[in-house]
Image: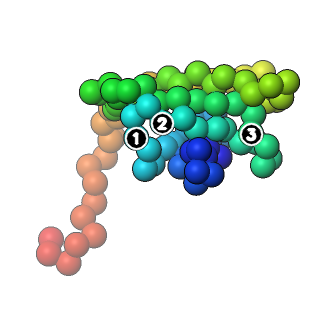
Amino acid sequence: EVKNDNEQTVGLVDDDGNVYLAGVKPGEHMSVFWSGVAHCDINLPDPLPADLFNGLLLPCQHKGNVAPVVPDDIKPVIQEQTQQVTPTNPPVSVSANQ
């Protein structure tokens, strides 16, 4: 999980290492926790980029001698825009007003 300097949880880390933040402000400092222990720090830029649709790479700066255990198949933190998929069959209406 990700906590701000007030120890409030402001984000979650998914299984692929992507971080989802909420309620944060430009320039804010946060710590990333694994198993309840702070392992590294991240800082939001100030100002924030205008286009956050594709994500934002926030390098995690290690705290002291504590290094996180990282899986061999780690993926980049930034999410890439996925391609649009066209359905093979048109959607079926479930509405009563067909």
Q: Quadrant of the C terminus?
A: bottom left
Q: Are marks 1 and 2 in contact (CB under 8 Å)?
A: yes
The structure residue drawn at horizontal position 53% and vertical position 25%, both measured from the top left corner, is: 58
The structure residue drawn at horizontal position 44% and vertical position 44%, both measured from the top left corner, is: 24
37 shown above or below 81: below
Q: Position of residue 71 (x, y in %)?
A: 78, 27
Q: Position of residue 61 (x, y in %)?
A: 66, 22
Q: Position of residue 32 (x, y in %)?
A: 66, 38
| 82 or 78, nearer to the observer | 78
Distance from label 1 to label 2 (Cα)? 6 Å
**Circle number at residue 28:** 2
| 56 or 82, nearer to the observer | 56
Find the residue positioned furthest to the bottom.
Answer: 96
Q: For label 2, count other residues whose C-alpha is less than 10 Å away and answer few (under 14), some (14-19) or many (20+).
A: few
Amino acid residing under circle 2: Glu
Query: Which quarter of the figure has residue 70?
Result: top right
Find the residue positioned furthest to the right.
Answer: 65
**Circle number at residue 98:** none
Q: Secondary structure at mark 2?
A: loop
Amino acid residing under circle 1: Lys
Q: Secondary structure at mark 3?
A: strand
Distance from label 3 to label 2 (Cα)? 16 Å
Q: For label 3, count other residues whose C-alpha is less than 10 Å away and answer few (under 14), some (14-19) or many (20+).
A: some
The answer to whether residue 20 is seen in the rendering is yes
The structure residue drawn at horizontal position 78% and vertical position 21%, both measured from the top left corner, is: 72
Nearest to the eye among marks 3 and 2: give it: 2
**Circle number at residue 38:** 3
Name the residue tied to disc 1.
25
